[in-house]
Image (cartoon, rainbow, N blue to C red):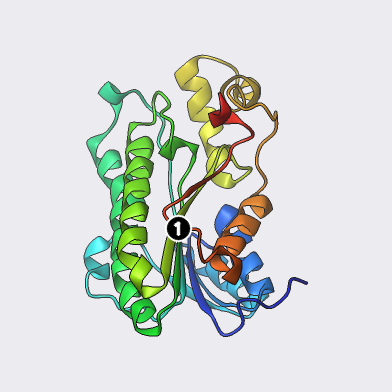
Amino acid sequence: MSEHTLKDKRALVTGGASGIGAAAVRALAQRGAHVIVADIDPEAAESVAHEVGGESWAVDLTDTAALADLSLDVDILVNNAGIQKVAPIQDFDPADFHRILMLMLESPFLLIRAALPHMYEQGWGRVINVSSIHGLRASAFKSAYVAAKHGLEGLSKTVALEGAPHGVTSNCVNPSYVRTPLVDRQIKDQAATHGIPEDEVIEKIMLTESAVKRLVEPEEVGELIAFLAGPSAGMVTGAAYTMDGGWTAS
């Protein structure tokens, strides 16, 4: 069991019912935080929340109008919820592009906006944005995802500058392909788009740029998120923490 460095802290993790989000929930809870598991799947959110003694929040974060007047009394905000669509730009449905940007850029802005007053009042806060290697590098056929993650990087840096006088840090976590349901669902689309068998997608598409030839595990990302949420990371802000097996080293 990890030391309770986050005792008496309240954390909100979006997309917290599975994958990176669930790993972050567990890592934060192990350090003593009370965690709110926000997810579009109410049953899955309740299950993870029950596991860690937290609470669940069933929410559709693409309904950004409903978030406009939100107020959050949380100390730690982890913007993790995300979806993916793989298609050439000329075939990319504009509705899908809009939905991805609402979920992965507009809703993080609105949640940050809702959480900052409480963080500022107490003089302490942590905003952790789960970006991606695609927040730093582009890939073909992922126009919406890449655009959203690049936007999230800029938003995170702006929050870091504004939040610094108030004791609030803001950082991005940038993993490459993580062993999650989101990545699993990409395999079929990637195979069709690139014209290769599904069993070759991980090796020939997902790991081709990585020096370490394996997927990132969700728990590895969760541990990094927990570090950034903790007291040892007070001087870490405006940063993009890569966890990419060396992808960006070349």
User: Which residue is located at x 39 percent, y 81 percent?
Assistant: 73
Task: From this view, report whether residue 155 is shown above or below residue 198.
Answer: below
Q: Where is residue 19 drawn, in percent x and y?
A: 59, 53
Answer whether residue 103 is visible to the viewer in this image. no
Q: Is residue 161 visible?
A: yes
Residue at left offset 57%, top offset 46%? 181
Kindly identify the amino acid type of the residue bearing the numbered disc 1. Thr
Secondary element at tag 1 = loop
Residue depicted at x 47% and y 56%: 80
| Closer to us: 47 or 138 | 138
Q: Which corner quadrant of the image does residue 165 belong to?
A: bottom left
98 is higher (above) or lower (below) than 119: above
Q: Nearer the viewer, residue 189 or 33?
A: 33
Q: Looking at the image, how many numbered discs can be counted on the residues?
A: 1
The N terminus appears in which quarter of the rendering? bottom right
In this picture, is 200 found above or below 47? above
Disc 1 target residue: 237
Where is residue 54 shown, x and y percent of the image? 58, 79
Locate residue 112, reporting x and y percent.
34, 66
Within 10 angstroms of label 1, few (less than 14), some, or many (20 or more) residues? Answer: many
Residue 73 in the image: above or below residue 139: below
Q: Residue at x 32, y 48 (%)?
A: 154
- Direction from residue 96 to residue 189 in the image, left or right: right
- Residue 162 % position (x, y): 30, 64
